[in-house]
Amino acid sequence: MNDPAGFQGALVGYDFTLAGARLTALGSGALWWAERRLLCVSDLHMGKSERHLRRGGAPLPPYETRDTLARLAALIRQLQPETLLCLGDSFDDLAAAQALPPEDVQDLRSLIAAQDWIWVEGNHDPGPAGFGGRSCTEMRLGPLTFRHIAEGDAEAGEISGHYHPKARLRRGSARPAFLLDRTRLILPAFGTYTGGLRSSDPALAGLMASEAIAILTGPKPLPCPMPR
């Protein structure tokens, strides 16, 4: 189960600048852009337990969407964003989106109605799912470009998700982590049942510049040289 610091680390953050934008990596695994009052989360993967069972997997406790929404609602109450941007793979697939329990649907729609809600399409959830908000393949806001999957030749200011990065210190356990260099930021997964890819994996090591850092989530976000 992925619980990036739960509520405890929700508002504790690590401040940095990307393409001139002042941003904060929160201990919860979300990204806060205070100047725009924009909250960004990636890879919620709502409905994962339903899809897992539908595809022949062992039953999982079907509470991951409720937990993910509860943590997201807590962040929204605390930060009062004007814009909420979901950075792709918000649902485990479109069938899982349609199979959400009614109480989860009601809670999700209440959150969407409270602010400008943007769905960036992911590889698991292409196209709108019918819950409201607006959908796009990528979003350009000021100096930043938000997309689901990082592009190797991206201009400075790219923010993406998809890989669910994790990192660890020598004597610690692996934690969900932001990966940051001069060009891009990759967010950790926010969803409760999401796994993770070590920052040393070639897919991530090949994307991130040599000076990249990992910002480990938790009660106090911890920046360190990106483990390779």
Image (spheres, helix red, strand yellow):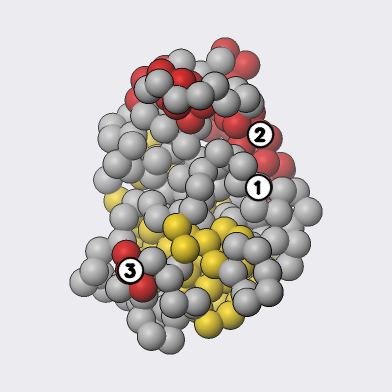
Tell me if I can see residue 225 in this picture: yes
Does residue 186 appear to the left or right of 153 in the view shown?
Answer: right
Does residue 125 appear to the left or right of 38 in the view shown?
Answer: left
Q: Quadrant of residue 126?
A: top left
Residue 179 at x, y percent in the picture: 47, 69
Q: Residues within 10 Å of mark 3 (few under 14, many from 20)?
A: few
Rounded to the nearest whole Å, what is the CA distance between mark 3 and mark 2? 31 Å
Asked if the residue under mark 2 is in contact with the one under mark 1, i.e. CB atoms within 8 Å, the reply is: yes
Eyeballing the image, is 85 above or below 20?
Answer: above
Eyeballing the image, is 27 above or below 82?
Answer: below
The outermost residue toward the right is 8
Rounded to the nearest whole Å, what is the CA distance between mark 1 and mark 2? 9 Å
Does residue 169 appear to the left or right of 153 in the view shown?
Answer: right
Q: Quadrant of residue 193?
A: top right
Rounded to the nearest whole Å, what is the CA distance between mark 1 and mark 3? 25 Å
Q: Disc 2 marks which residue?
A: 67
Can you say which quadrant of the picture contains the N terminus? top right
Residue 149 at x, y percent in the picture: 31, 55
Mark 3 residue type: Pro
Q: State which mark lies toward you, 3 or 2.
A: 3
Can you say which quadrant of the picture contains the C terminus? bottom left
Asked if the residue under mark 2 is in contact with the one under mark 3, i.e. CB atoms within 8 Å, the reply is: no
Q: Looking at the rendered structure, which numbered label has been put on residue 3?
A: 1
Q: Disc 3 marks which residue?
A: 202
Q: Residue at x 34, y 51 (%)?
A: 148
